[in-house]
Amino acid sequence: MAHDWNDVFLLDRPEREAVAEAPEARGGFLRRLRESLGRTREALSAEVQATVAQALDEESWERLEEALIMADVGAVTTADVVERLEREATDTGLSGEALGERLIELLTEQATVGDGHIDLRHRPTVIMVAGVNGTGKTTTIGKLAWHLVQEQQLKVVLGAGDTFRAAAVEQLAEWARRAGCEIVTGDDGSDPGAVAFEAVRRGREQDADVVIVDTAGRLHTQDDLMAELAKVRRVLDKQLEGAPHETLLTVDATTGQNGLRQARSFSEAAPVTGIVLTKLDGTAKGGIAIAIARELGIPVKLIGVGEQLEDLRPFDPGNFARALLEP
């Protein structure tokens, strides 16, 4: 899985000279992630310590299971992890610190599914971004564009397909200015498919490396809007066969298990290649990242812990599990 921005992108650009990431940037993000998951980590680590410090009886396993469910790891994932941990403890005598370390390994394994890379080997690569209103979709697009242009030295075109919310277009235009890339917009209330079509056309015309298409925020229960999302996908394929090459779904981590339901519904309307888990900034429990990966088989590719540019990072399952569990 990816550890930094240079790892997360799959590229076929021999002439590209990516900007090396400063080690302190990664370290600073890990500190913010641990701080963001502080309350969950304190509760989980306390339960793990209590479990490994006493006889491993049925009651101790039940308490550990309850703590993981309370952390939004999900009932299905939790049952699997605790069952395996209990079996290994019984069969091999696993206990103490080794048991806690094994729990981290099992959660890492559960969160490691599919391909965590963002594949940019098409020219142009078309990325469609979807999600419920308020999940940080437009901000995520802006930050992703900045990293692609400023660090990966790629040419990017943005498509402002959320034509029903003027603020979304304005916000994306500001990010385009900040990142140094072009943006394609439409009139208020215009057809999102037309904007997406034009963005890809412009990207092909200008030999862009990446085209990122925003879509209108929608609830996963709104059948007509979910159908529209599928329509945008078909429009993109007409302009460029095989597009979109990546479909990223932003999920608000604070919504807990509802985020899992959202991801399931969106993936049925338009095949989702990756999750961007946002708002891991203090109130989220965090385990939903593991639940989505395990139960839906969709890799979490990016996570966000705040509003600043450096607060969006590639998802590393091992570091995430440690941030959840290590004291």
Image (cartoon, grey):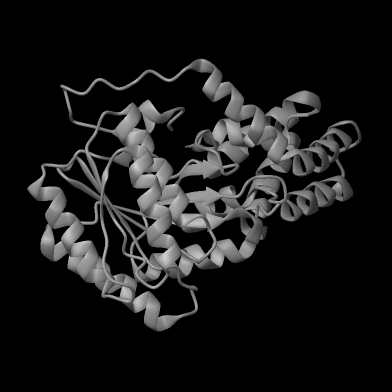
Taking the image as shown, residue 310 lies to the left or right of residue 231, namely right
Residue 202, image x and y in percent?
Answer: 14, 53
Is residue 270 in view from this perspective?
yes
Q: Residue at image x 53%, y 23%?
A: 25
Q: Residue at image x 26%, y 67%?
A: 186
The single residue placed furthest to the bottom in the displayed view is 224
Taking the image as shown, residue 172 lies to the left or right of residue 25, namely left
Taking the image as shown, residue 17 lies to the left or right of residue 188, namely left
Residue 18, image x and y in percent?
Answer: 30, 22
Query: In the rendered picture of this protein, how many numbered marks are placed on residues?
Result: 0
Q: Residue at image x 65%, y 56%?
A: 254
Residue 242, image x and y in percent?
Answer: 16, 56
The single residue placed furthest to the right in the displayed view is 54
Residue 229 appears in which quarter of the rendering?
Answer: bottom left
Residue 9 appears in which quarter of the rendering?
Answer: top left
The quadrant the N terminus occupies is top left
Q: Is residue 16 above or below residue 89?
A: above
Q: Residue at image x 26%, y 75%?
A: 191
Residue 5 appears in which quarter of the rendering?
Answer: top left
User: 175 and 106: which one is in front?
Assistant: 175
The single residue placed furthest to the left in the displayed view is 205
Taking the image as shown, residue 309 lies to the left or right of residue 257, namely left
Is residue 298 in view from this perspective?
no
